[in-house]
């Protein structure tokens, strides 16, 4: 099952993806609205009737060829691990880390799967990073890697857009990773039950149709389960939190010479079984506050 958010007659609604179309849940859950985190929290309460809707999808309420928005408007936390594919570590000139290296992407960096992404006026070193994104389904703290999967709701495709000069100017990566709109994800959440093993998925990224990244999640240095267990030792993970699990080799900064994104460039990130996101990069529109 794939579940996300679509704009229907000016109103954001939660819907199920069905053979390329969308089935709004408002027909069975009229008070649901567009709060995906609330639905995740109450999933056990609603999943039977949602399954019944899928068993007999109503043609009259089907939305044809919908444009999906990010499935969670404002995630509580967006945690991201660095240096977690061997080929990316090698191209970065780094050593394989003995411990997991974590940073966060701020809430204002969240963006839609098919929206424009701003190229900031303060940098010309914007780069892409295709990533598997896990969505937490249940509150957890101090859990083991062996039990971690039961706390995952599902998976998305993400792009950990990175402003390299800002990222590398400081040992703390948060600013270079958190520019506004620099965390597109989606196009919807594919439920964990629909994925046999999230560590066996092909992942790729193309820039203007040119293949730049091509790998498989089996090459993760630290598994998703190890990541969740490690994070849970420090912070409480909550429904709707996102975990960006790392990017494979092929990023622009590692090319010779480095190749950064320019106005008009399109980046498509795709993961087997999860769909794709496709974003065009545009110059930032700057408004100066008082």
Image (cartoon, rainbow, N blue to C red):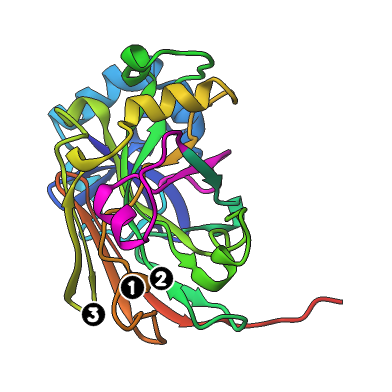
**Location of mark 2 (residue):** 127
Task: Point out the tag, 1 or 2, that comes first from the N-terminus.
Answer: 2
Task: Point out the tag, 3 or 2, that comes first from the N-terminus.
Answer: 2
**Location of mark 1 (residue):** 252
Q: Dot 1 lies on which element?
A: helix
Q: Distance between the residues labelled 3 and 2?
A: 13 Å
- Whether residue 108 is situated above or below residue 141 in the rendered picture: below
| Residue plotted at (31% across, 61% down) | 67
Rendering coords of residue 14 (x, y %): 39, 42
* Residue closest to the eye, 23 or 201: 201
Q: Residue 93's quadrant in the figure?
A: bottom left
Q: Distance between the residues labelled 1 and 3?
A: 13 Å
Position of 168 with respect to 258 (left or right) is right
| Residue plotted at (41% across, 70% down) | 127
- Whether residue 76 is situated above or below residue 227 in the rendered picture: below
Task: Point out the tag, 1 or 3, that comes first from the N-terminus.
Answer: 3
Query: Marks 2 and 3: in contact by CB < 8 Å?
Result: no
Give the magenta range: 71-100
Instruction: Name the mark nearer the viewer: 3 or 2.
Output: 2
Query: Marks 2 and 1: in contact by CB < 8 Å?
Result: yes
Mark 1 Cα within 10 Å, few/some/many (few <14, many 20+)? many
Q: How far apart are marks 1 and 2 (CA)?
A: 6 Å
**Location of mark 3 (residue):** 208
Mark 3 Cα within 10 Å, few/some/many (few <14, many 20+)? few
* Residue closest to the eye, 172 or 60: 172
- Label the magenta part by its dominant secondary structure: loop
Q: Dot 2 lies on which element?
A: strand
């Amino acid at each position: 099952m794939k579940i996300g958010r679509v704009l229907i007659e000016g109103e954001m609604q939660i819907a199920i993806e069905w053979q390329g179309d969308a089935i709004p849940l408002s027909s069975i859950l009229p008070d649901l609205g567009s709060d995906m985190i609330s639905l995740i929290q109450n999933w056990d309460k609603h999943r039977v009737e949602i399954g019944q809707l899928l068993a007999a999808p109503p043609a009259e309420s089907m939305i044809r060829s919908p444009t999906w928005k990010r499935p969670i408007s404002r995630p509580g936390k967006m945690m991201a691990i660095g240096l977690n594919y061997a080929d990316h570590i090698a191209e970065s000139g780094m050593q394989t880390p003995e411990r997991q290296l974590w940073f966060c992407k701020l809430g204002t960096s969240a963006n839609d799967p098919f929206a424009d992404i701003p190229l900031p006026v303060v940098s010309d070193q914007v780069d892409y990073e295709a990533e598997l994104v896990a969505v937490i389904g249940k509150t957890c703290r101090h859990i083991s890697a062996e039990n971690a999967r039961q706390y995952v709701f599902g998976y998305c495709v993400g792009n950990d857009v990175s402003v390299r000069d800002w990222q590398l100017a400081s040992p703390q990566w948060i600013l270079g990773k958190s520019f506004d709109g620099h965390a597109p994800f989606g196009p919807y959440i594919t439920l964990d039950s629909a994925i046999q093993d999230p560590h066996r998925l092909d992942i790729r990224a193309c820039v203007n149709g040119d293949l730049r990244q091509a790998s498989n999640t089996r090459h993760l240095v630290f598994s998703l389960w190890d990541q969740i267990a490690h994070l849970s030792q420090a912070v409480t993970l909550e429904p709707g939190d996102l975990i960006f699990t790392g990017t494979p080799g092929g990023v622009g900064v590692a090319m010779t010479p480095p190749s950064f994104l320019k106005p008009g460039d399109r980046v498509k990130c795709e993961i087997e079984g999860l769909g794709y996101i496709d974003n065009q990069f545009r110059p930032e529109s700057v408004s100066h506050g008082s």
